Amino acid sequence: MTEQIDKALAREYEAGFVSDVESETFEPGLNEDVIRRISVMKGEPEWMLEWRLSAFREWLEMEEPEWALVDYPKVDFQAISYYSAPKSMKDKPKSLDEVDPELLRTYEKLGIPLIEQQMLAGIAVDAVFDSVSVVTTFREKLEEAGVIFCPISEAVHKYPDLVKKYLGSVVPKKDNYYAALNCAVFTDGSFVYIPKGTRCPMELSTYFRINEQNTGQFERTLIVADEGSHVSYLEGCTAPQRDENQLHAAVVELVAMDNAEIKYSTVQNWYPGDENGKGGIYNFVTKRGICHTSAKISWTQVETGSSVTWKYPSCVLKGDNSVGEFYSVALTRGRQQADTGTKMIHLGKNTKSTIITKGISAGRSNNSYRGLVRMNPGAQGARNFTQCDSLLIGDQCGAHTFPYVESRNPSAIIEHEATTSKVSDEQMYLCRQRGLDPEKAVSMIVNGFCKEVFKELPMEFAVEAGKLLEISLEGSVG
Amino acid sequence: MSVWLENAIARGQGADDWLAPKRTQALELLAKTAWPTRKTEAWRYTPLRSVERSPAKASTVAANLLPTSVADLSAIELVFVNGRFDTTQLTDDLPEGLSITLGKNLSSGQQGEALANISTIKPERHLFGLINDVLSQDVLLVSVAEGVHITQPIRISSLSSQGVESHTRVFVNLAPNSRLTVIEDTHAQGDSLTTAFVEYQIASNAYLEHYRFALQTGNNVSIGGSHFNLLDHAKMHSTLVGFGSDLTRIDTDIIHAGKFADAKLNAMYLLDGKELFDLHATVEHAMPNGTTEENVRGIVADRSRSVFNGRIHIHPDAQKTLAELNNRNLLLSDRAEINTKPELEIYADDVKCAHGATVAQIDKQALYYLQTRGVSRARAQVMLNFGFINELIDLMPNAALAEWVRPMIRERFLQMEVN
């Protein structure tokens, strides 16, 4: 058994390789000049630069948050390079044929053949390779429906009014330390606009990939679903192996206008560091959506990667009858640390929120759920249900639950429950009695444990998530 | 740092009694402690304005205050008046095996022993615990000898006059196989500020039946803690009943320092007016096979605010732990506020832990049902509130206390209805 474990534990990170693309990268360091240079590189209008600079000035005044249950060497923000672009991007490719073949091969290694995806999956892919969006596909088809799906740097030029109106409207510049940093230095990300009454004809997807060493990634995603529209957005990540910690401080903003619906799904599998926790990604992400009347925002996440995760996808339920959902599976192993959860802020009448989280800790990892449910005085008849379950595999890991429940409306109903246990001997006995080896048995039990969340994922993602979990759990069974 | 804290530190300097080493230690810690703000997790929902604005002053004037009478209780009364232990109210006929002494009256050898124990159960993180270390007049030591079962309950009353600031401190030691019942009660008049801390060392196979009442309301500040250290096979059953005041804050810490320890905590708070009540209950499972069961219920009316923080921490060695926490709240008014945070921090895998928290108003259907049976709405509301809390009152092992507290709670519900 131990042999089996050792073997599996020694498993290399499958997506861990560095593809060799010449790139133009800034010297490490952060100051106003760097921000001006980023802005120039992006050919941004003056208002955008001003916005960045004001965020930077706010950031300088702010302090790094320390309340999360994570412990890591502090980030040296002056040691990070804030811009890195594949060189061949200078004369923007018009089609896939014009794309650096090395880039395409990177995607292929990751199992994301763009062409195949275009044809088979019907997914428009806005692939972020380091900081510049390389390929945007299915643009025409989306344009037909009136849907805008483009790099946010392009949106700044093409749709300045929309960007001006909504950028920073959900996550303000000084919302938190990392969000402020993101505002100052974000290089790219996706912009989505779904017009009134439109159902987006396909699932939108962005694959992020951190490639350049020592390059922080600061994506900025803004999704606006206008009245009565519907969109499902997929985000998946994987990064190459390296030895230095990398900071990832993304901001995602969702705006769901009256009766609109946004479904945002994430599978996150960034490099978690080696067995000593060295070299993994720091994932400090701010994700928040605002729901107007009768709108719905649903966050689904499967988190298996990163050495440190600090992430709380949230919903501000501003409009009456709006709905927020959060479904999460977070798996930590090795020396991974995850402090993740959600915030549901109920402002409108009859607003509803559901939180289902499944935390799985193995190895020497620590996995925390941290959540806030707040019923403001105006949240007449609001309703929340929260269920947080934790599963422990091994006696050196930790599973923690920190839910904050605040109610200021007597007609609101809040229910929270949490359980923590290990895979029971009875369950294992039953499975093994039926001829399953321990690893299979645990995998099956864990999959069952996560089922409530997986069923919320789009089909392709659900398959990927299940597989990811299975691979991640290898060798965790004793 | 606040003026109030600076003032407290200044007053605590230069003590030369037997507690001086403890006081110095506490002063050092206080010097490093920042005055809590909204960003201080332990005081997130509990502003300390009422402490800063408190007109209370320490007093040396003798006052004649008596503990509230409880029918059929016949307890051994330990009475603190304005922070001073009132020896005249202590019976000189103590049961065999029970000793009650003021620290200053011990021999220096015994004082040394006591010093090694005091403030070791109360965690250092409690700001007002440190202030109590510095400012309490003396420490009262209660001790039950090995194998002795004391049937007569002990009641510790901290009584404060109008405008007085007082700090009381007790250390209770239960030797192996002993049994004891302790009731902590605080009564304070207006404009007063009280801190009252009691530490319990519960040795193997000993059993503590514990009650804490914080029933004073009005414009006073009452802060305190009950801290329990359980050794192998030790057991405790604790009941806490709280009304709010300008600020009432209680910290309960239960430490499973031995194997197979068992702790039960039933707590209830009933708030009205502009009261604020804050209960922080922490359970540390440091050793295996421990069990904890916590039931906390609150009813929050008018413009009052409740804060509950229930933390269960399972350390790596505490395998086979069973721990459960349940917090249920009724929010009766649209100007009241409930903040609750049940926490689990778990570092051992072979454990079963769960917590649950609910916040809601009274079940409309139940209310409707009673009204269809001819019960007035107001009365139905009182009945349902009472039923919600009475389940926990019924679990109080001491019938005399249950009968004493029941009418007070009923009274409180009637008053909530009037408002």
Image: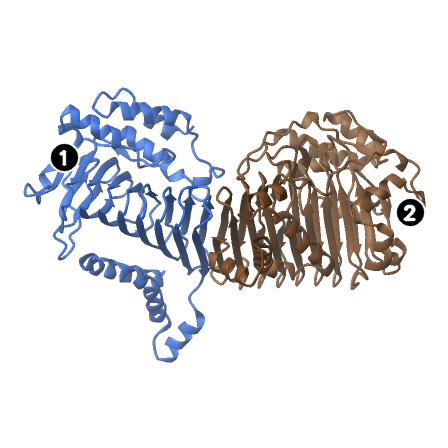
SS for tag 2?
Answer: helix
Q: How is the image coloured?
A: by chain
x, y percentage for residue A147?
Answer: 83, 56
What chain does badge 1 belong to? B
In terms of image quadrants, where is residue B313?
top left
> Mark 1 packing: few (<14 Cα in 10 Å), some, or many (20+)?
few
| Chain letter, brown in picture | A
x, y percentage for residue A87?
Answer: 87, 33
Q: CA distance from mark 1 to mark 2?
A: 87 Å
Vertical side of A449 occupied by A331: above or below: above
Which numbered disc, 1 or 2, marks the residue closer to the eye? 2
Any part of residue A388 in sight:
yes
x, y percentage for residue A415?
Answer: 49, 60
Q: Which residue appears at 38% of the width and 43% of the height? A: B284
For this view, does B218 lie left or right of residue A368? Answer: left
What chain does badge 2 belong to? A
* Amino acid type, mark 2: Leu
Q: Which mark is residue B101?
A: 1
Any part of residue B272 in sight:
no
| Tint of chain B | blue
> Mark 2 packing: few (<14 Cα in 10 Å), some, or many (20+)?
some
Vertical side of B379 occupied by A168: above or below: above
Q: Which mark is residue A96?
A: 2
* Amino acid type, mark 1: Thr
